[in-house]
Structures are given as C-alpha cells and as structure tokens.
Amino acid sequence: MHIIMFLYLMKILFSKTYDLYHIYFDSNRIFITE
C-alpha cells in the first residue's frame, strides 16, 4: 500500500514539473522569436 501511494505521489510530482518545464521553454521560445 505504501509503495502504491509513493508511486502515485511521484507521478503527480513528475507531471507537475514536466508541465512547468514545458511552460518555461514555451515562454522562452516566444520571447526569443519576438
């Protein structure tokens, strides 16, 4: 049970950081092109 909860939390953290990473790079690309 603990392992499942841990994996679930890791998945949430990973998806959040992944989204932030993409938002950051998209904004940089827009900034550079303009």
Image: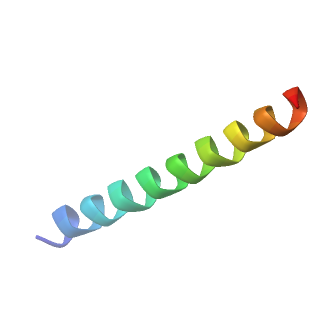
Instruction: Name the one closer to the observer, 6 or 31.
Output: 31
The correct choice, above or below, for 5 with respect to 24 in the image is below
Q: Quadrant of the C terminus?
A: top right
Q: Answer with left or right where residue 12 lies relative to residue 31.
A: left
- Residue 12 x, y percent position in the rendering: 35, 60
**Point 60% across, 41% down: residue:** 22
Q: Answer with left or right where residue 33 lies relative to residue 5.
A: right
Q: Answer with left or right where residue 24 lies relative to residue 11.
A: right
- Residue 17 x, y percent position in the rendering: 54, 55
* Snapshot quadrant of residue 5: bottom left
**Point 43% across, 61% down: residue:** 13
- Residue 7 x, y percent position in the rendering: 28, 58
Instruction: Name the one closer to the observer, 15 or 3.
Output: 15
Farthest top residue in view = 33
Colour pattern of the rendering: rainbow
Instruction: Name the one closer to the observer, 16 or 27.
Output: 27
- Residue 9 x, y percent position in the rendering: 32, 66
